[in-house]
Image: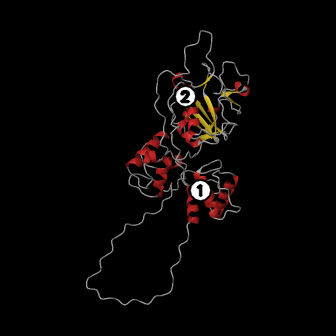
Amino acid sequence: MDVAPDIDDPDVTHHDEDDDPGSLIGDEVEYDLGPDDDPGAGPGEDPGGEDPDDGEEPPPGMRPPVRLAPVLACLRNEINARWPNRDRASDGWIGDTAHQATKSDHNPDHDNSVNALDVDRDGIDPQLVVRRAIVHPSTQYVIFDRTIWSRTRGFTPSRYTGSNPHTKHLHVSVSHSPELENSRRAWGIDAGVPTKPLKLGDRVLRTGCTGADVRELQALANTLGAKPPLTVDGDFGSRTEAWVSGFQKAKKLTVDGLVGPKTVAALRTASTPTPAKPSTTAKPPTPAKPQTKPPAKPPTKPPAQPRREPGSRTLRRSATGDDVGFVQRFIGERRCGTADGEFGSRTEAGVRWYQKMQGLTADGAVGPRTWRKMGVQVRY
């Protein structure tokens, strides 16, 4: 586009944009954003005071310079501080010529504020950014990976029906209210410490996911005899998806290329060594020794807890098992404490927080609706 002289170092976005993307919302979908166990979770308080970009009112008849909304400038600064070496090829905020003919937040509004930001997905944790954005009071909607989280739908993940799938970058649009677009409230992304590495089973893996849990999956695939061996690079690409689909077919699972609870359980079973069978050689009986007093009875051991798959029952206070551990890891250590598989008061409080954030009845019990919000198939 022809850049106006009063725009200071514009960051032009060239991505094809749909007209009024906030209205292109399809059916609700299941989308796993991973566990929120980062110590910097949650937006901070607005420090208040005069915003450095506000300045004085312009003289009558003159508009202020075009600028990125201050609240989005804070978001961009936090992302850059958290991932200083990230890829910026798909970044952008002010629209090019193609955007000028559309109803886009990349175009300056009545006060010359641009209320949309595009961030390249490479070199960051996009799920973390989405998690922070959908709880920030200034956010209107977020688009990423063919999915939209909109304030009009309570930020429930829904299929994005626009022509641009937003698979190379994520898009954040904020309110045009002066109070919200000028806010300097922290987004909770610049935590000052690295994100805790994810483990296999902490989230549903699909094409495009990256991280330590993907590397664990690829290494496990090679242990199980992947031919040719997968490159253990932590990038869930087409070869990793093809191997997962083949494994699911061999184990008679739903062949969707997604690594969810059932596929993880099958992987664990397949990689567990088979215990050696006891010898069948009979040993001669040992002569009984005379006893002077009755033998002491061995202490009674409590029955072993059955292995529970996520989504196989409703969880509430005092429940124990693997499915409780899944919920604790999903919501995160910051809310539920250590993932010990025991549903106590802190886990219940974490479940209530998650239900309230998702617009569910905050009863502290993990029932069918809460399981589905977590992306888990209900099997009871």
- The picture places residue 126, in percent across and down from the top left corner, at 59, 41
Sort mark 1 into few (<14), some (14-19) or many (20+) by Cα contacts within 10 Å. Answer: some
**Residue in front for this viewpoint, 322 or 44:** 44
Q: How many marks?
A: 2
Q: In the rendered image of this protein, does residue 256 appear above or below residue 284?
A: above
Query: In the image, 360: left or right of 93?
Result: left
Provide the residue designation for mark 1.
216
Provide the residue designation for mark 2.
71
Label 1 to label 2: alpha-carbon separation: 37 Å
- Name the residue furthest left: 292
Q: Looking at numbered disc 1 in the image, what kind of residue is underneath it?
A: Glu
Residue 25, by quadrant, is top right
Scheme by which the image is coloured: secondary structure
Residue 265, by quadrant, is bottom right
First in sequence: mark 1 vs mark 2: 2
- The picture places residue 334, in percent across and down from the top left corner, at 45, 45
Query: In the image, 113: left or right of 281?
Result: right
Q: In the rendered image of this protein, does residue 158 appear above or below residue 59?
A: below
Asked which secondary structure carries label 1, the reply is: helix
Question: Is residue 342 something one can see in this rendering?
Answer: yes
Sort mark 2 into few (<14), some (14-19) or many (20+) by Cα contacts within 10 Å. Answer: many
